[in-house]
Amino acid sequence: MARTRNSLIFIFFLYYLVIFSTTFGAKRSEKEEAASLFIFGDSFLDAGNNNYINTTTLDQANFWPYGQTFFRFPTGRFSDGRLISDFIAEYAKLPLIPPFLQPGAQRYYNGVNFASAGAGALVETFQGDVISLKTQLSYYKKVECWLREKLGNDEAKLIISRAVYLFSIGANDYTSPFLTNNFTLLNSSSHSEYVGIVIGNLTTVIKEIHESGGRKFAFTNLPTLGCLPALRIIRTEDNGRCLKKVSSLAKLHNKALSKLLFDLNKQLKGFKYSIFDMNRRLRERMNHPSKYGFKEGETACCGTGEFRGVFSCGGKRLVKEFQLCHQKFPKKVHVALFIFGDSYFDAGNNNYINTTADYQANFRPYGESFFKYPTGRFSDGRLVSDFIAEYAKLPLISTFLQSSTDQFTSGVNFASAGAGTLVETHQGLVIDLKTQLSYFKVVEQQLKQKLGDAAAKKLISKAVYLFSIGSNDYFTLFSTNSSVLQSHNSKIEYAGMEIYKEGGRKFGFLNLLPLGCIPSMKVLIVPGSTSGNSCQEDGTELAKLHNKALSESLQELERALEGFRYSYHDFYGSLIERMNNPEAYGFKEVTACCGSGTYRGILSCGGKREIKEYEVCEKPSEYLFFDADHPSEMASKQIAELMWSSEIPNVTGPYNLMTLFHHI
């Protein structure tokens, strides 16, 4: 909705895209990179169509400061940067979807954006100034004809049936009477009947797209409209609080929308849909902004008046004066990241030690997806820890053995591929956890020399300490002996206590993935064995025992150590979920991308180890594993997202990493 549009758009995009990106990933064709994306709606999704129609600046955003954060110039989007639909396209591996009315030769294979700021499901909503939903549908039919003419009926039908149809519509139908003080249409019927007309118009559009061959639909429900800044400043009996009348209309709409989609799912053949509860997610962030990284949950970044609710951003509308926030996001205390562990986190320390190629990844094709050259990471691109650093607004964390002291203030990566908690694990070829801990103490002393005791102490206490360790201990010993398990976890506990003694308070842990289910273990299964799930059962049981013991140890440390806070991610569960349902997460294969043998489970990737022959896939992002032991960059990114912001306690808890970095 254009006339109540404000910078709160960025608050809720993350949850929306997480939900919808799985929908897109699940339905990719064998031949296509991604399904097409057709976008309908209002200013929440308008990428610039209103730049090309005869309207007023109330329904346009093609002037500064719109667009300043990402594009660095105004594009017509009612945002400081990208919109929800832009992120959806990115996650679906599509380019930015162009507006239908953008001049120039159009190619519609990836989809089109028909959305228009100010539009509603009702033709009467801001009639003459916007592109109504009915007109957007007529534009879609033109694109459908173009596809059939260019590609032929069969191929066009395939694109249309595989496409996703994304909708954000209805907000302007309910807010326009309050913003224009024209209640004629709203008061001509009961509120329930009015909502029924809005939903009825949307139903017609959905059914016509379905009739043309569309099958996959995505919707956002309406936010609590009366709590948006532009509505809160309307002086009514609510006296500056949320405008209850318009919020109640949104509530009725959301209930009716859910029922409609449920009914259509039963009525229309092949109809599939995803609906995102924007209402609840936005309300959570408005009520608890700091929990989600925001300083303001009620006030707009750009505008004037109370809540900056006067729609004056840019000074091109009726009111020329406006204020612009200087810092949209709260100014964060700098938080460093110190990383300990094995090959899941090693960013290249093993490049600088006397070891073998079994514990190194400084050769091609490692690194090909992101860095375009091998860095020493056991991945086609970035690791979980790299994404965590990015989300924490930190640079890539340098490895200890290549860092200068100038880089230590952002943190250090001590991890070593092949390392374990036990000194005996691959002894002499890797940097064990005990040695990594000694390196941390060296860094601590250098920080004190560089910053002074007080500043170094503050940095250490605010820092997050990230661990992924233990897998190699079990690969090496392959024993279910409980004393071995106790030894592993006691050493992790010891490392945590040592860091705690030095002032560390915030810790992040990955538990062990299902060891018996990774390609290098599955390849060891004897043909004809009784393993029903094709996993090496002993390895999987070891991981379960370890994870239970680690969880109990962390709970004990939290009780025993004042100020000890931790985040524990169920890596085991996350990998199992993706192994069992790969398509739901955008993967085509649960085998390795690079290696040889069954499942490509022999660690021969790159041809520098004992076995020289290997195969490598064309698209690592379609594989859960890059080599026989390690997740692909795409899998690592998904795990990092869960570690960073998951609110589900049995996935990541008791805190997520975003909370540890920004709110504790």
Image (cartoon, helix red, strand yellow):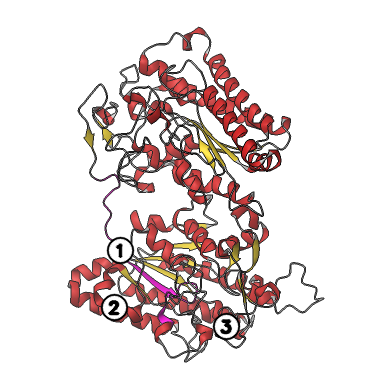
Badge 2 is on which residue?
443
> Horizontal and vertical percent for residue 350?
43, 83
Residue at 63 percent of width and 62 percent of height:
576
- Of the pair 187 and 501, the residue shown nearer to us: 187
Query: Label 2, label 1: how many angstroms apart (C-alpha)?
Result: 15 Å
Q: Amino acid at mark 2?
A: Val
Where is residue 585, by image quadrant?
Answer: bottom right
Badge 3 is on which residue?
607
Residue range (magenta)? 327-350
Which quarter of the rendering shows the N terminus?
top left
Mark 3 or mark 1: whose residue is earlier in sequence: 1
- Of the pair 385 and 598, the residue shown nearer to us: 598
Q: Is residue 446 among the parts visible in the rendering? A: yes
Mark 3 or mark 2: whose residue is earlier in sequence: 2
**Label 3 secondary element:** loop
Mark 2 neighbour density, 10 Å: few (under 14) some (14–19) many (20 or more): some
Residue at 55 percent of width and 82 percent of height:
473
Mark 2 or mark 1: whose residue is earlier in sequence: 2
Query: Label 3, label 2: how many angstroms apart (C-alpha)?
Result: 36 Å
> Horizontal and vertical percent for residue 13?
44, 43
Does 346 lie within the magenta span?
Answer: yes
Mark 1 neighbour density, 10 Å: few (under 14) some (14–19) many (20 or more): many
Badge 1 is on which residue?
462
Query: Label 3, label 1: how many angstroms apart (C-alpha)?
Result: 43 Å
Vertical placement of 505 versus 436: above or below?
above
**Label 1 secondary element:** helix
Q: Which of pointers 2 and 1 indicates the residue nearer the eye?
A: 2
Which quarter of the rendering shows the C terminus?
bottom left
